[in-house]
């Protein structure tokens, strides 16, 4: 979510500078909900706004509005002008499939996206999550170990710690 706030030129600390971390989180979530509604509204008038579709897909995933996120990711595929944009759109589609429980489809799409973007830590972590969901822990571990430690998200770090346990 913080990446989305940065892209929207909002400083997360400014959202709740005087409050606690929980208050900041609540304000950030409220802001994201408002941003989600605003982008949906603007896309009705500017349907070819690439960045708007990308933000809508990412926010939709955050907000668990997977139908909207999926539609926005599909629009991104149509609007993509570069192979990198196409791969990012595929990655968002793969994440939607993962969140909807379509594990095999998620793995297939995320493998394709990560082959085009082999250093994208976020996509690699999503692929590892899909492998874990599909009970392919060895493949997940291999992917997570490829990601530089400083680029790993919290979930990736936790998964690597779990892989070290003999009972996992």
Image (cartoon, rainbow, N blue to C red):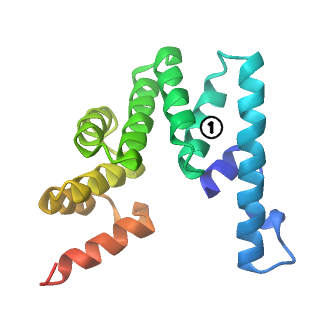
Q: Residue at x 45, y 19 (%)?
A: 82
Q: Residue at x 77, y 74 (%)?
A: 23
Left or right, 1 with reference to 73: right
- Quarter of the image with the C terminus in it: bottom left
Q: Nearer the viewer, residue 41 or 126?
A: 41
Left or right, 105 with reference to 40: left
Task: Determine whether the residue tagged by mark 1 lies in a helix, strand or loop.
Answer: helix
Q: Residue at x 52, y 23 (%)?
A: 76
Q: Nearer the viewer, residue 10 or 126?
A: 126
Q: Residue at x 58, y 33 (%)?
A: 54
Residue density around tag 1, few if under 14, some if 14–19, many if 20 or more, within 10 Å: many
Q: Which residue is mark 1?
A: 55
- Residue 59 placement: quadrant: top right
Q: Position of residue 68 (x, y in %)?
A: 57, 34
Q: Position of residue 53 (x, y in %)?
A: 61, 29
Q: Is residue 99 above or below residue 149?
A: above
Q: Is residue 67 above or below residue 61?
A: above
Q: Position of residue 159 (x, y in %)?
A: 30, 70
- Residue 84 placement: quadrant: top left
- Quarter of the image with the N terminus in it: bottom right
């Amino acid at each position: 979510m913080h990446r989305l706030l940065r892209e929207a030129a909002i400083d997360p600390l400014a959202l709740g500078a005087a409050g606690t971390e929980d208050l900041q989180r609540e304000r950030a979530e409220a802001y994201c909900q408002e941003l989600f509604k605003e982008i949906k509204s603007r896309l009705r008038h500017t349907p070819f706004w690439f960045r708007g579709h990308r933000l809508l897909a990412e926010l939709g995933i955050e907000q668990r509005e997977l139908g909207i996120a999926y539609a926005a990711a599909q629009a991104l595929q149509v609007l993509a002008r570069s192979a990198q944009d196409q791969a990012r759109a595929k990655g968002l589609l793969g994440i939607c499939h993962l969140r909807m429980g379509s594990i095999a489809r998620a793995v297939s799409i995320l493998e394709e996206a990560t082959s085009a973007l082999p250093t994208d830590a976020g996509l690699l972590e999503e692929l590892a999550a899909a492998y874990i969901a599909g009970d392919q822990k060895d493949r997940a571990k291999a992917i997570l170990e490829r990601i530089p430690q400083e680029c790993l998200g919290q979930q990736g770090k936790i998964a690597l710690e779990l892989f070290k346990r003999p009972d996992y």
